[in-house]
Image (cartoon, rainbow, N blue to C red):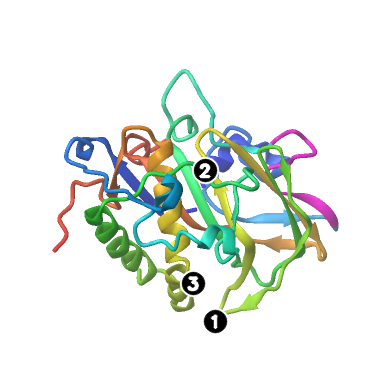
Amino acid sequence: MTILSNVGVADGGGGGSSVLNWKRSFNSTGWQALFGSNANSDPVSLGVTGTSTTARTTYNRVVIAAPYLLSTGTSPKFVEVKFFVQQTNYPVYPLHWLKLSDIYVARLPGVLLGLLNQQFSIEANIATTGDDEPQLFGLQFVTNDYAVLET
Amino acid sequence: MDLKVQYNKSRLIASIIKLAQAAGGISIPNGVNPNAWTSGDITFLSGTPGAPPSFIDLTDDEISLFDADLRKLAYMIALERDLSSLLLSQRDSFLFAAAIAKSQLTGRAFGGLLKGSGFNM
């Protein structure tokens, strides 16, 4: 989740601060940034450098693979997503939310693969306003010097 | 993305990469159906349409560690029970992603959840 700290607050990130939970409040319907925004040139970047080594400095440290979206809120508030990975603009994908015991899960059209130092963003079509907790669910492959960072 | 798998540089020296090769010199990742990419069984949204990123096979030892850690993550009591099967069903995808990550994180070996400092039996 630290990779979201590099994204602006309006685009689902922490605006330079740590993001410690997945809570989002959607105040309007329509297409909005879910995790980073291509329209606002504010993607999730895995190539962030910095003067000091923190969990924000992902350069040469992080690869992610996420085949699912989870919603741990009361109910999912979005019905479609659109992926932008590097320069590739993927088609709009309708989500089929499966209700589990107390969460919702949607399988993505493929495994979202965030490669080393590359960037991606996910935008969502919000159908209902309110609070939600959308999460990427998968694995994160990181270097051991990155994994032990506390900030 | 709370689940982390780590690569441990210290294991690099001891790692021996065993590559099986198909006709034409295409490397086949251990444990992953090499036809999966073109058959569409496994699809990646990687921003590299038409061709997979480069990868380096995990060694047999690394695959054993990978599978053990994946099971461990899948059955963490903190996880919702249903999520276990979701994680395990993506084993081949994750293994291929691990091979890609191994290629991208230059000079690294797969160290598992405990960055190679733990002990599996």
Relative to B46, A52 lies left or right = left
Query: In which image quadrant can residue A119 be found?
Result: top right
Image height of A58 relative to B102, above or below: above
The span from disc 3 to disc 1 (Cα, nearest Å) is: 14 Å
For marks 3 and 2, the one nearer the N-term is: 2
Of labels 3 and 2, the one closer to you = 2
Q: Which residue is mark 2?
A: B53
Residues flagged by tags 2 and 1 on a common chain = no
Query: In which image quadrant can residue B25 be found?
Result: top left
Query: In which image quadrant can residue B105 be found?
Result: top left
Q: Which residue is mark 1?
A: A101
Contact between labelled residues 1 and 3, with CB atoms less than 8 Å apart: no
Of all residues, the one furthest to the bottom in this rendering is: A101
Is A50 included in the stretch rendered in magenta?
A: no
Q: Dot 1 falls on which chain?
A: A
Label at residue B98: none
Q: What residue is drawn where x is 31% and y is 58%? A: B66
Of labels 2 and 1, the one closer to you = 2
Relative to A130, A108 lies left or right = left
Relative to B62, A13 lies left or right = right
The span from disc 2 to disc 1 (Cα, nearest Å) is: 37 Å
Give the SS element for disc 3. Answer: helix
Give the SS element for disc 1. Answer: loop
Report crowding for label 1: few under 14, some 14 to 19, many 20 or more residues within 10 A (C-alpha): few
Q: Dot 2 falls on which chain?
A: B
